[in-house]
Image (cartoon, grey):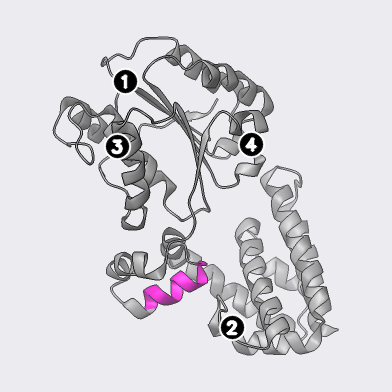
Amino acid sequence: MAALNTTPIAEREPLPWLRPRFAELVRLADAGRLPHALLISGPRGVGKHSLVDALAARTLCAAPGTAACGECHACRMLAAGYHPDLMRVELEEGKRQIRIDAIREVNQVVAQTAQQGGYRVIVIAPAEALNVAAANALLKSLEEPGARTLFVLLSDIPSRLLPTIRSRCQHWSLGPPSADDCLPWLAERFGDEGEARFWLQVAGGLPLEALRLADPESRALRQQLVETFEALVRGGEPVAEAARLDRQSIDAILWYGIAWLEDLIRLGLSGESEGLRNPDLLPLYRQAVKNARVRDWFRLLDYAREERRLLAAGGNPNPQLVLEAWLVRWSALLRS
């Protein structure tokens, strides 16, 4: 069964770049027009959870203003990590699906009266992890949620949700914020605006992803992959290079590969370095562009995206073979 998360909600407002969207939700709630089911989607690293936490806290607050008051009994329970009318269903560690048992528990909660006499809030994340049986079991509650019940489904890839689930939710899509909206917040955490700007660019404009990519472990993987790229450009043996990357996350490796291929294609088509996500790799890109045609990079990009999709769905049981095949294809293009 999925994990029922009891992480404390300490922040009453979302991240700075999401505050306008939060204000829209507040206006709907105050006008009595907040739907019973929200689907909040956006790429990993945009801050969806902060928006949902702020909304859940305000919805359960006994004396809400523009945000949760932070002082009432409900707010104190949330800060302590438990509120009887908040249920969060998440993936268990190492699992790829949310199964029907967790949704049956949700349905039991929805059938009862809220213990604090106010709203019940059910958060499901990532919603695309619902297997078919779980999604079908959820439909009845989405269709007949009962009074003062709010479902919030979070999704990185909403297209993977059943259409019947999507159609029963009001969809709010979050995109990468402008640099002006998030760079001050990010620079404060990095302690340096130049470094914050660099990692935000590497992360494709996603602030929380920038923080994750800049942590020591992720930096070390990126540097190792850059060295692998350099070795392949010099004619290194791809299977041997794959062995050096053993035990590294194949999903992260493919993520970097996709970002670098997108840069290569942009450079190959325009000849301009403006807009590259990884400007520090420009010398390697230029060498790679000389050695293969743009259409071949497109084919490799399609391959990487499909392998990443299959891995996410549990479709390939041997990540090391995927890594070897991936580097063999890279190497073939770099030598062509």
Q: Secondary structure at mark 1?
A: loop
The tag earlier along the polypeptide, 4 or 3, is: 3
Q: Is residue 277 above or below residue 7?
A: below
> In front of the other: label 4 or label 2?
4
In space, the residues marked 4 and 3 are separated at their CA atoms by: 28 Å
- Sort mark 3 into few (<14), some (14-19) or many (20+) by Cα contacts within 10 Å: some
Q: Residue at x 33, y 27 (%)?
A: 32
Residue behind mark 3: 8
Q: Secondary structure at mark 3?
A: loop
In space, the residues marked 2 and 3 are separated at their CA atoms by: 41 Å
Residue behind mark 4: 161
Q: How many marks?
A: 4
Question: Which sits in the foreground, 237 or 255?
Answer: 255
Residue extending farthest to the right is 336
Residue behind mark 2: 281
> In front of the other: label 4 or label 3?
4
- Sort mark 2 into few (<14), some (14-19) or many (20+) by Cα contacts within 10 Å: some
In space, the residues marked 1 and 3 are separated at their CA atoms by: 13 Å
Q: Is residue 157 above or below residue 125?
A: below
Look at the numbered discs 1 and 4 and tell me whether their residues touch, using CB distance below 8 Å.
no
- Sort mark 1 into few (<14), some (14-19) or many (20+) by Cα contacts within 10 Å: some
In space, the residues marked 2 and 1 are separated at their CA atoms by: 51 Å
Look at the image and give the residue range highlighted in magenta: 195-204
- Sort mark 4 into few (<14), some (14-19) or many (20+) by Cα contacts within 10 Å: some
The tag earlier along the polypeptide, 4 or 2, is: 4
The tag earlier along the polypeptide, 2 or 3, is: 3
198 part of magenta stretch: yes
Numbered mark located on residue 84 in the image: 1
120 part of magenta stretch: no
The tag earlier along the polypeptide, 1 or 3, is: 3
